[in-house]
Image (tube, grey):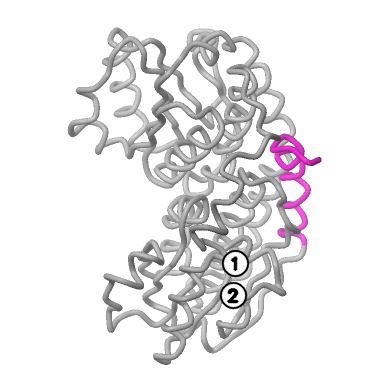
Amino acid sequence: MATMMDYIGEEQATLANSLKNYRYVETSKQQTIKNVLILATGSSYNACLAAKPALESLAEVTVTIEEPYHFNHYGHLSTAVDTVIAVSQSGKSASTIDAIGKLKEQGIYTMALTSDLSSPICQKVNEVIDLEMGIETVGFVTKGFTATVLKLFLLGLSIGQNKEILSAQEVNQYLAQLEGDVAKIPEIIEKSQLFFEKNESIFKLANRFIAIGYGPNWGTAKEFETKFTETIRKPSQGFELEAYMHGPYLEADHEHVLFFIEAESENRQRSQRLKEYMKPFVGKAYTVTTRTATTKDGEDCLGLSLTCDERFSSLFLVIPFQLLAYRGAAAKGIDLSVRIFDDFDQVLKSKI
C-alpha cells in the first residue's frame, strides 16, 4: 500500500517529467485571455492560491479563485471573465463538475486540470490539461499539489509567450531555473527529515499548529492547514502574514507552535520581526525558508538553500510541510493507513 512518503519521494521525478514534456503551442485562444476564474476546493484550491502570483504576472491576467459549491449556489459570474479553469485531481468532484458544466453552457471557455483523463470532468470542458502524475491513491494529497502548482506555472508561461509578453528565450530561462530547483527536491526531503528528527518531541506534545506566509506562500500556509488537520488531527491554521497580525495573534499562548514561511521578498523582514515578537509568547517558533540556514539561525530554522524566484517558491516550500505532516502523525501514534469516515463520500455525495 502506497503512503504519503512514497508520493513525496516521487515529486522530483514527476515535476521533472512535466518540465521535460513542456512544449510551446501557439494558440489564438491564449492570446485573448485576460480574466480567469478558477474553481477548486481543498488542496487544489490551496495549489491555485500558491500559483496565483506567478500565473498573473507571467500571463498578465487577473485570477479569481472560488470554491465551486459556494460559487454554484451563491456566486455571480463577472462579465469580464473569459476563461474558467476547473481543478480536480480526481476529476470526480461533484461540485466542481456541476459548476463547470453550467458555465460551459453559458458559452464561457472552460479548461480542466486533472490527473484522470477518463474522469467525468473531462467531458464537461473545452480543453483538458493533464497533471501528468498518475492516480494518487492516498487521500492526503502531496504529489497532486505540486503537480497542480507547476502546471499553472507552465500555463502562465504559455499564455505569456502567446501574448508576446515573454520571449522564447525568457521562457527557456524560467524553465531552466525550475529544472535546477526541482533537481534539489531530494536534498529538500533529506533536510526536512533531519529537521523533524531534531524536533520530534515538539510534534509529539504540541496541540496547536499555525503557519504564516506571504505572497505565493499564503497558499503554502493554507496547504499546511489542510495537511496537518488531515493527518496530525490537531487544530491547525494557515494565515497570510498581515492577516495574522490583525487579530489571530491574540490567541497565542505557550501551546502554540508557529511556522514562518519565507522566500526572498521585501516582506521577509516583516515576517522575521513578527517571529521575534511572538517567540516569548508561544511554545515554539520555526522558520522554513528558501535561503541557507546559518549557525545563528540554530535548529529552529529549516533552510532549503534555493535561489528561486519568489513566485516559484511555493513549489518547494510546501514539501517540508508534507513530510512534517506525515511524520508528525506517526509521532502522535496515528496510523494513516487506517481509513476513517470510510462512507463519507458515499453519504455526502461529494464525489462522483
Say what amino acid the circle numbered 1 marks: Lys
Residue 19, magenta (yes or no): yes
Secondary element type, mark 2: helix
Rounded to the nearest angstrom, the CA distance separating label 1 from label 2 is 7 Å
Q: Which residues are magenta?
A: 1-20
Looking at the image, tell me whether mark 1 or mark 2 is earlier in sequence order: 1
Q: Amino acid at mark 2?
A: Ile
Q: Residue at x 68, y 68 (%)?
A: 130
Label count reads: 2
Q: Nearer the viewer, residue 297 or 11?
A: 11
Q: Which residue is mark 2?
A: 121
Q: Is residue 132 left or right of residue 322?
A: right
Report the residue marked by disc 1.
92
Determine which quarter of the picture holds residue 271: top left
Secondary element under disc 1, as helix, strand or loop, is: loop
Image quarter where the N terminus lies is: top right
Q: Please tell me how crowded label 2 is: few (under 14), some (14-19), or many (20+) other residues with Cα within 10 Å.
A: many
User: Mark 1 and 2 residues: CB-CB less than 8 Å, in contact?
Assistant: yes
Residue lying at 24% horizontally and 30% vertically, measured from the top left = 248
Residue at coordinates 51% horizontally, 52% vertically from top-left? Answer: 47
Q: Which mark is residue 112?
A: none
| Name of the residue lying farthest toward the right | 1
Q: Residue 73 location in percent, x, y?
A: 31, 71
Task: Tell which of 79 and 3 is nearer to you.
Answer: 3
- At a point 26% along the width and 15% down the height, the residue shown is 277
Residue 56, compared with residue 159, is above or below; it is above
